[in-house]
Amino acid sequence: MSLRLGDIAPDFEQDSSLGRIHFHEWLGDSWGVLFSHPADFTPVCTTELGLTAKLADEFAKRNVKTIALSVDTQEHHVDWIKDINETQAAKVGFPILADGDRKVSQLYDMIHPNASETVTVRSLFVIDPKKKVRLFITYPASTGRNFDEVLRVIDSLQLTDNYSVATPGNWKDGDDVVIVPSLKDEEVLKQKFPKGYKAIRPYLRMTPQPNK
Ligand code: BEZ
């Protein structure tokens, strides 16, 4: 059965380029990004993993651990990491799961047989510190993902978990946000949004990002 938002991300134990990983234990109190790619030593995947490595500080700032996956072997991963580091001017410090037995791929529904019977598509899951799935995206093998978008969604999730706001289309960190429609009490609005807000419609109220 496929995973849905709010479900607990399945726990697993699997080998990786950095040794055996017990997933929930490895996540600890961090957020997680678990993402699959079709195969090692392929061009798009090489750029994606290089990008993730170069964004390490951005992920760390948000308390996010990243972990990649393909069905290739641990030895392949270790060799490929040398190539990624060399060609992408990066330093891959995160683990790549060696999911040769498809254990994790099946738990997270990462193999889409009508796309490929044998390898994983580009699935990506954002998991919160309570181990809940908060985002999933699936891209075809031919399209590399936008990791700035992944960071943008994590910013939105972390903001909206802490304030009574939601983020509008194309929002990015620092832009105005919308007040959740369920919040109507004037006194509560004043207290929660001391910078004020603009009611364009009763249901469409914009306010400066509260944590800035
Ligand atoms: C790639 O990562 O470059 C790739 C993998 C599978 C199919 C097409 C491209």
Image: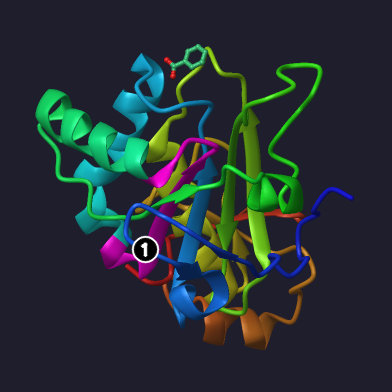
The amino acid at mark 1 is: Gly
- Please rate how many residues cluster around mark 1, counting C-alpha atoms within 10 Å: few if below 14, some from 14 to 19, many from 20: few
For residue 209, what is the image quadrant?
bottom left
On whether residue 96 falls in the magenta region, the answer is no
Report the side of 14 relative to 26 (left or right): right
Label 1 secondary element: loop
The picture places residue 68, in percent across and down from the top left corner, at 45, 46
Question: Closer to the camera, 33 or 15?
Answer: 15
Provide the residue span drawn in magenta: 60-74
Residue at the spot 56% in from the left edge and 18% down from the top edge: 141
> Which residue is the extreme one toward the right?
1
Question: Closer to the camera, 84 or 163?
Answer: 84
Label 1 lies in ligand 1 vicinity (Cβ under 8 Å): no
Question: Closer to the camera, 106 or 202?
Answer: 106
Residue ID for mark 1: 19
Report the side of 11 relative to 159 (left or right): right
Residue at the spot 79% in from the left edge and 23% down from the top edge: 113
Report the side of 48 relative to 118 (left or right): left
Residue at the spot 68% in from the left edge and 65% down from the top edge: 9
For residue 148, what is the image quadrant?
top left
